């Protein structure tokens, strides 16, 4: 069984490294929340016109990009629009496509300074969450100092959390490069939620490790204790993950366009959270125990 943990741990490292490389090569396509600009979400009750026809009708407006949304929707992105230009675009749609049944579903406009502020606050929020996790785990599991350094469980948990966020980020870098999917505040909300779910899975395993160590003492092999703890909590973790994923898949398939990629980020993160608590945090814990007793 030790070999399985080792293989899966290095598979995880490979996936995370690939995600980092992909993100560095392609970068993230930032939405208006972070990059500034305006976005219009439109729906055509009588059928969406061809994108090429829409682009031609809006040729007087510069820096426009658009993408279909569902069967009858269209999302238009541009630089920051004044209310006058916003109304001018809507009027142009009504003139060019009078029988399309146009309805504006959403209009968001964010200035570049506000977008940059949101980006900085999002990064700060994620860093504070990670620091909070380290402190919390170090305090809660301090009784294991006889088998592990006080910081070991915090470090193992943080590595697992970074793994759970980095891989979806790499996936969204690919989606942004090939399909134009943007990173918005919704993605950050998904990342923070994933961090909460992931640390919950990890803490459940760590808590059972603590119970088994305190019950069996230091005589039993620590690797065997960790494996036993994983087996004891495995069904609980799988059941929780499966039921959560069912809800998220339903949101992804039947929810609106605005939360579709939130659900996708959550699906990847929740799955990776259950995976990393077993194949990232736990093997790392055993390795740190061996390093501490050399």
Image (cartoon, rainbow, N blue to C red):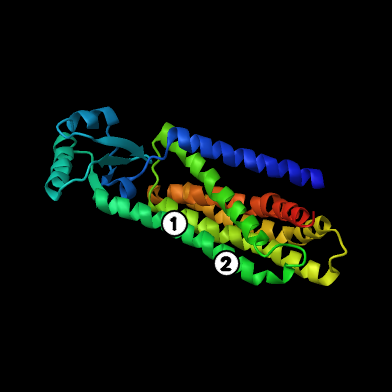
Label 2 element class: helix
- Give residue 106's position: percent from left, percent from top: 27, 51
Q: Which mark identifies residue 135?
A: 2
Judge by depth and name the residue closer to the eye, 39 or 99. 39
Res. 174 visible in picture: no
Neighbour tally class for label 2: few under 14, some 14-19, many 20 plus, Cα within 10 Å: few
Quadrant for residue 176, please give it: top left
Camera-side residue of 20 and 107: 20
Q: Please give the name of the residue rendered at 58% of the width and 39% of the height, measured from the top-left corner.
A: 17
Task: Give the residue at x 38% y 49%.
Answer: 184
Horizontal side, residue 185 vs residue 11: left or right: left
Percent from the top left, x then y, of residue 107?
Answer: 25, 50
Q: Residues within 10 Å of mark 1 (few under 14, many from 20)?
A: some
Labels 2, 1: front one = 2
Residue labelled with disc 1: 189
Task: Name the foreground residue: 115 vs 139.
Answer: 139
Q: Earlier in the sequence, mark 2 or mark 1?
A: 2
């Amino acid at each position: 069984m030790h070999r399985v943990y080792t293989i899966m741990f290095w598979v995880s490292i490979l996936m995370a490294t690939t995600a980092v490389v992909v993100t560095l090569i392609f970068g993230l396509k930032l939405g208006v929340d972070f990059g500034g600009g305006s976005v219009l979400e439109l729906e055509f009750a009588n059928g969406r016109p061809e994108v090429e026809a829409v682009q031609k009708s809006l040729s007087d407006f510069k820096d426009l990009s658009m993408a279909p949304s569902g069967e009858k929707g269209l999302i238009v992105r541009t630089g920051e629009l004044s209310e006058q230009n916003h109304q001018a675009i809507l009027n142009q749609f009504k003139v060019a496509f009078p029988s399309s049944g146009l309805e504006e579903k959403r209009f968001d406009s964010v200035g570049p300074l506000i977008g940059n502020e949101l980006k900085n606050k999002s990064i700060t929020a994620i860093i504070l969450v990670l620091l909070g996790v380290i402190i919390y785990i170090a305090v809660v599991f301090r009784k294991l100092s006889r088998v592990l350094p006080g910081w070991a469980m915090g470090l193992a948990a943080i590595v697992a959390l970074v793994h759970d966020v980095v891989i979806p980020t790499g996936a969204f870098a690919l989606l942004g490069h090939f399909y134009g999917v943007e990173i918005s505040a919704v993605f950050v909300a998904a990342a923070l939620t994933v961090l909460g779910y992931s640390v919950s899975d990890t803490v459940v395993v760590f808590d059972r490790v603590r119970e088994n160590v305190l019950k069996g003492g230091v005589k039993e092999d620590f690797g065997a204790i960790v494996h036993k703890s994983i087996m004891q909590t495995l069904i609980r973790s799988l059941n929780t993950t499966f039921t959560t994923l069912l809800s998220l898949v339903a949101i992804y398939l039947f929810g609106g366009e605005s939360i579709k990629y939130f659900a996708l980020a959550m699906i990847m993160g929740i799955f990776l959270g259950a995976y990393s608590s077993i194949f990232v945090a736990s093997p790392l814990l055993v390795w740190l125990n061996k390093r501490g007793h050399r």
